[in-house]
């Protein structure tokens, strides 16, 4: 019987798989080839992909309008060397575009043309800085979402047959989907999609891990510490009994590796850092050398700009990360100011053999920045100080308030810090933390010690999504 080709937009018929994998190789091939390319060859590849992307951008009303307003014509951008001529944009620009052109904005193109023409997936940002921002994925983008995660976790040591537990819900948030596809579709490991603690309780998460042989985990570090505590208190077991081979997580601004050491001591295994966003998927990853986050530069072109001036900064200096996603056509992402603070720490070949640039850990968000007495403060920069004393739970929340005394307006920050219920005494803890925070932040802040668990709701702890580290009360009326 002759096969009849479906007229439906069948997902697996919507991609040229050979073209995809020859352009963006699967994990083991990537590790042996593109990951080790010399800088000159990588730059040539980036330039080729960038020029293709610019053709898409000029056909997109969101970009063409912005570029024309900046006085640009297509002939002005001849190579990736000209990329800085293009104006950057932020998530606020996308939100405005989506509000003016619902539901998904000109940023995505004509919705009436898109819908039904090809299989689509929708994911959103976490909404930690406001209303969640929608991002569509076509088949190519959706595969790259999993492929990049698979590459990262393969280089970090995940292999076929491993059992990877994923306490992140497959919802409108991207993390659960990204990790599931990465390990299932692109490594051949077994994903346990247990979801967050709301979907599967922490006790049950651990029971499943013991029963089914989980030997790797991917989720946020705060929940990993919670699981270790539940294992001890409720199961009366040591989480080390799981014999976990690796943990894959998001260490944030753990520049002194205190959070890493805590997790490695609790779990008895290596802990590897990852970096990504809703739009980028997995953009960076540590290798097993643990000496910087490799930027996946065949997929993402990264610029670091001064937070206030928008000018490029030298390697080693922190600034806003501005990204161009070289493989994304729906939507195109060209010079997106993520407002994540990063710095390039190495352009040399790593001992693992990788030649892609390495950046430091995620250092915080510039839109969370608070200026106190002329000093720029990033709430995530409190991490090392809070983790430095075992009497804390490692959780904190920065609260900023505005006071007026004798006609003088002054902003003040109080860092609320949870005290572990296991702490035998807290004498001197407040003073120790205030001194350490002043040294790390460069300005004096107050510390308010609170009970274990007191910050759970305000800081979004133990729930889906990233913890919140800033509560800004400056615009609230004072009683």
Image (cartoon, rainbow, N blue to C red):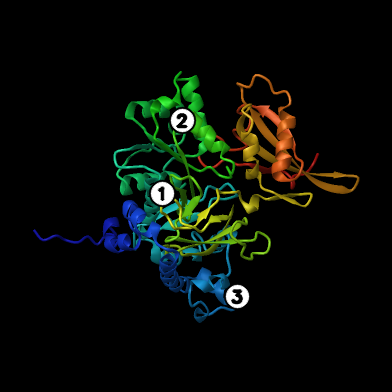
- Label 2: which residue? 267
Q: Quadrant of the N terminus?
A: bottom left
- In front: label 1 or label 3: 1
- As measured in the structure, the alpha-carbon distance from the residue carrying label 1 to the one carrying label 3 is 37 Å
The residue most toward the right is 406
Q: Residues within 10 Å of mark 2 (few under 14, many from 20)?
A: many
Toward the viewer: 268 or 462? 268
Q: Earlier in the sequence, mark 2 or mark 3?
A: 3
- For the question of whether residue 277 can be seen, the reply is no
Please indicate whether residue 186 sits to the left or right of residue 96 in the image: left
Toward the viewer: 309 or 257? 257
- As measured in the structure, the alpha-carbon distance from the residue carrying label 2 to the one carrying label 3 is 52 Å
Quarter holding residue 450:
top right
- Label 1: which residue? 152
Q: Which mark is residue 165?
A: none
Quarter holding residue 218:
top left
Toward the viewer: 56 or 371? 371
Q: Using the image, determine if residue 339 lies above or below residue 310.
A: above
The secondary element bearing badge 2 is classed as: helix
- As measured in the structure, the alpha-carbon distance from the residue carrying label 2 to the one carrying label 1 is 21 Å
Q: Residues within 10 Å of mark 3 (few under 14, many from 20)?
A: few
- Label 3: which residue? 70
Toward the viewer: 460 or 373? 373
Please indicate whether residue 187 sits to the left or right of residue 253 in the image: left
The secondary element bearing badge 1 is classed as: helix
Which residue is pictured at 61% across the width and 62% down the height?
314
């Amino acid at each position: 019987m002759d096969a009849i080709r479906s007229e439906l937009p069948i997902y697996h018929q919507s991609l040229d798989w050979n073209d995809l994998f020859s352009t963006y190789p699967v994990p083991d091939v990537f590790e042996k080839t593109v990951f080790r390319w010399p800088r000159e060859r990588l730059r040539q590849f980036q330039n080729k992909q960038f020029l293709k992307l610019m053709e898409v951008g000029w056909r997109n009303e969101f970009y063409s309008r912005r570029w024309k307003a900046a006085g640009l014509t297509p002939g002005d951008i001849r190579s990736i060397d000209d990329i800085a001529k293009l104006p950057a944009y932020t998530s606020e620009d996308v939100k405005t575009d989506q509000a003016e052109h619902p539901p998904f904005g000109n940023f995505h193109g004509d919705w009436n043309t898109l819908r039904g023409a090809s299989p689509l997936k929708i994911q959103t940002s976490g909404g930690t800085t406001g209303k969640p921002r929608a991002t569509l994925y076509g088949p190519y983008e959706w595969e790259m979402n999993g492929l990049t995660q698979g590459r990262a976790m393969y280089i970090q040591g995940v292999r076929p047959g491993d059992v990877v537990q994923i306490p992140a819900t497959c919802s409108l948030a991207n993390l659960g989907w990204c990790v599931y596809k990465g390990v299932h579709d692109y490594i051949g490991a077994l994903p346990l999609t247990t979801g967050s603690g709301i979907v599967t309780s922490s006790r049950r998460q651990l029971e499943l891990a013991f029963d089914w042989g989980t030997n790797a985990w991917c989720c946020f570090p705060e929940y990993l510490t919670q699981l270790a505590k539940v294992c001890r208190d409720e199961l009366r077991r040591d989480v080390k009994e799981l014999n976990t081979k690796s943990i894959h997580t998001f260490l944030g601004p753990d520049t002194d590796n205190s959070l890493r050491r805590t997790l490695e001591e609790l779990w008895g295994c290596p802990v590897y850092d990852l970096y990504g966003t809703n739009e980028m998927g997995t953009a960076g990853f540590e290798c097993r050398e643990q000496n910087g986050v490799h930027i996946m530069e065949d997929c993402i072109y990264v610029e670091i700009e001064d937070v206030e001036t928008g000018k490029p900064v030298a390697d080693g200096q922190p600034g806003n990360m501005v990204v161009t996603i070289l493989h994304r056509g729906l939507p195109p992402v060209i010079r997106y100011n993520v407002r994540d603070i990063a710095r390039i720490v190495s352009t040399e070949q790593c001992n693992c053999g990788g030649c892609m640039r390495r950046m430091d850990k995620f250092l915080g968000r510039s839109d969370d920045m608070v200026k106190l007495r002329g000093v720029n403060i990033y709430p995530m920069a409190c991490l090392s100080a809070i983790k430095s004393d075992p009497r804390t739970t490692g959780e904190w929340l920065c609260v900023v308030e505005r006071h007026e005394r004798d006609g003088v307006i002054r902003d003040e920050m109080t860092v609320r810090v949870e005290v572990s219920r296991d702490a035998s005494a807290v004498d001197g803890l407040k003073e120790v933390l205030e001194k350490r925070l002043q040294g790390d932040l460069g300005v004096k802040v107050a510390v308010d010690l609170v009970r274990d668990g007191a910050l759970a709701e305000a800081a979004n702890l133990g729930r889906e999504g990233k913890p919140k580290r800033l509560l800004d009360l400056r615009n609230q009326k004072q009683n």
